[in-house]
Amino acid sequence: MKIEKFAGKINIKFNDIGLLEKALTHRSYVNEHGGSYWDHNERLEYLGDAVLELVVSKHLYNKFPHEKEGILTAYRSALVNTQTISLASQKLGANDYLRLSKGEAKDTGRARDFILADVFEAIIGAVYLDQGYEMAEKFIEKNIFHLTDEVIKQRLWQDSKSYFQEKAQEVVSITPVYKVLEETGPDHDRKFKVGVYLKDELIAEGEGVSKKESEQAAAQKALEIKEWN
């Protein structure tokens, strides 16, 4: 079976392979093909999210014995955010085994990232229920822990907007200002282009589906342009 092939890829022999199948099943698939609320992955995602947070918290607590809890929380947020765990899900090859509606299957980009992130957490939930805490911990260790040093080195634990403001004030004694340059699309699918300025100088532009996301993208580009990252 296809689902057993995926179990082999992640090197886990499930007692109940149905748990893994459910972890890879999006709500839209159930709605399109029939089934009940209990047949998709959202409850497993809920469980996996809690296990992921606990395992990563323990890892960071042990790795940084002299770091304060506020910094550890920021590190953890960077390690378990949508972008990070979506990438981990992609590397596992989960994309090829997702059960989605025809409509959802066409989505790419950020929409698919959210789905893959949810699936990663659901897989953790499935592993935890089927194999126990230690196996779930090993799964997370294998797929997430190695990213820790890069998160610290690249300061991914600190959001780009905050870091750009910190560097701008430190280097040029200016507080950055963000301005919306363009809004496009209907109300339900709005897109924003935002510029970040130092005084009257436009440093960089960023785009996203919200002003906040666009500001973060602009700040990240500005850090690269200024070589402050």
Image (spheres, grey):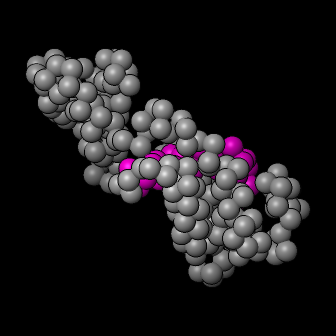
Seen in the picture, residue 181 relative to 20 is either above or below; the reply is above
Number of callouts: 0
Answer with left or right where residue 7 lies relative to residue 47. Answer: right
Seen in the picture, residue 188 relative to 131 is either above or below; the reply is above
Seen in the picture, residue 108 relative to 168 is either above or below; the reply is below
Can residue 113 be seen here? The reply is no
* Quarter-of-image position of residue 29: bottom right
Out of 187 and 112, give the one closest to the viewer: 112
Q: Residue reaching furthest front?
A: 66
- Position of residue 151 measured from the top left corner of the image (x, y, whole percent): 50, 39
Q: Which residues are magenta?
A: 71-99
Answer with left or right where residue 14 lies relative to residue 125. Answer: right
Position of the N terminus by quadrant: bottom right
Answer with left or right where residue 138 lies relative to residue 57. Answer: right
Position of the C terminus by quadrant: top left
- Position of residue 8 measured from the top left corner of the image (x, y, whole percent): 86, 56
